Image: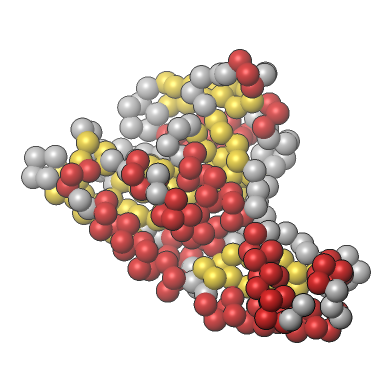
């Protein structure tokens, strides 16, 4: 196989297997090429990834070593996209009662949701994550996008147990916005004890739902490895119960009467190099 064709094939395989250890012997056998040629190809791919700001190849030494593709998208890559999302969320047609914004269209756009997943995966590039967790239902597509680029499974907490999921663990928590007691359940088979979990949600005001997921994870002796939200809303009347998180956008001001919305980039861009 010519080098040009081999480079295309290797790049495709690497991108489709993020954060997965791929041994050099695998490539040597797959493309019937010398180890030195494969090493040169990987150097070319790594240099190109870094130049384009889409990540890098991490080299693992030793007999069982190889390379891992680490998705680490640059701040320059994310700035334009995040601003576009802010502009879309600033559309007054999105206003809903209670100061909420309609975001289902963004969560339904494959390219948009995939890019959001890339950025969150990049923000948590230094974390050892075993699973991504969200609560049904709007956070599900977002969680799957993030999990795709972290190459880990998705765990979905629900408000009500499903008979098809077997035995579950449930907790009661206080909703940050309504101050009401609510229930959250997670099937026992969905998460291994001691897992390191990244929590992803679409919208956060006071953070009661995220706090509920954190409490649920304690029942599995699981560790919160990171928290990401698509949009955080400032609410002067509510005290935020979550402080260590990454947000793509920040909703500063919403006025139903004057039809005003002010949205700016969240702190996620600060996590990108």
Query: Between 154 and 177, which is closer to the camera in this rendering?
Result: 154
Pinpoint residue 105: horizontal percent, then vertical percent.
33, 44
* Residue at image coords 60%, 27%: 186
Is 97 situated above or below 154? Answer: above
Residue 129 vs residue 87: left or right? Answer: right
- Residue sticking out furthest to the top: 163
User: In the image, residue 59 lies at what x, y percent?
Assistant: 75, 73
Q: Is residue 177 above or below residue 83?
A: above
With respect to residue 49, does 154 lie above or below? above
Residue under the image location 21 percent in, 33 percent down: 97
Image x and y of residue 146, in percent: 54, 51
Which residue is drawn at the image coordinates 65% and 48% (left, top)? 152
Point out the residue furthest to the left here: 258
Instruction: Please identify the quarter of the rendering in which residue 4 is found.
Output: bottom right
Say which of 33 and 171 sits in front: 33
Is 115 placed left or right of 257 in the picture? right
Q: Is residue 216 visible?
A: yes
């Amino acid at each position: 196989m010519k080098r040009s064709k081999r480079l295309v094939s290797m790049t495709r395989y690497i991108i489709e297997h993020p954060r997965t250890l791929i041994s050099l012997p695998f490539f040597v056998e797959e493309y019937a090429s010398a180890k030195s040629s494969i090493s040169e190809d990987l150097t070319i791919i790594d240099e190109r990834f870094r130049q384009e700001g889409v990540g890098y190849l991490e080299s693992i030494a030793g007999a069982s070593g190889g390379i891992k593709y680490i998705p680490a998208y640059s701040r320059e890559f994310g700035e334009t996209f995040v601003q576009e999302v802010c502009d879309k969320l600033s559309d007054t047609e999105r206003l809903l009662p209670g100061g909420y914004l309609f975001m289902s269209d963004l969560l339904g756009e494959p390219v948009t949701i995939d890019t959001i997943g890339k950025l969150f995966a990049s923000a948590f590039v230094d974390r050892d994550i075993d699973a991504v967790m969200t609560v049904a239902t709007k956070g599900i597509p977002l969680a799957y996008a993030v999990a795709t680029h972290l190459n880990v499974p998705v765990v979905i907490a629900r408000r009500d147990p499903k008979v098809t999921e077997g035995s579950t663990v449930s907790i009661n928590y206080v909703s940050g916005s309504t101050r009401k007691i609510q229930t959250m359940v997670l099937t026992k088979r969905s998460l291994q004890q001691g897992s390191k979990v990244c929590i992803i949600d679409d919208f956060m005001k006071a953070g009661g739902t995220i706090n509920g997921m954190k409490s649920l994870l304690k029942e599995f002796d699981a560790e919160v490895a990171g928290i990401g939200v698509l949009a955080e809303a400032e609410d002067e009347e509510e005290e935020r119960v979550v402080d260590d998180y990454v947000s793509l956008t920040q909703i500063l001001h919403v006025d139903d009467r004057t039809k005003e919305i002010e949205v700016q980039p969240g702190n996620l861009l600060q996590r990108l190099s």
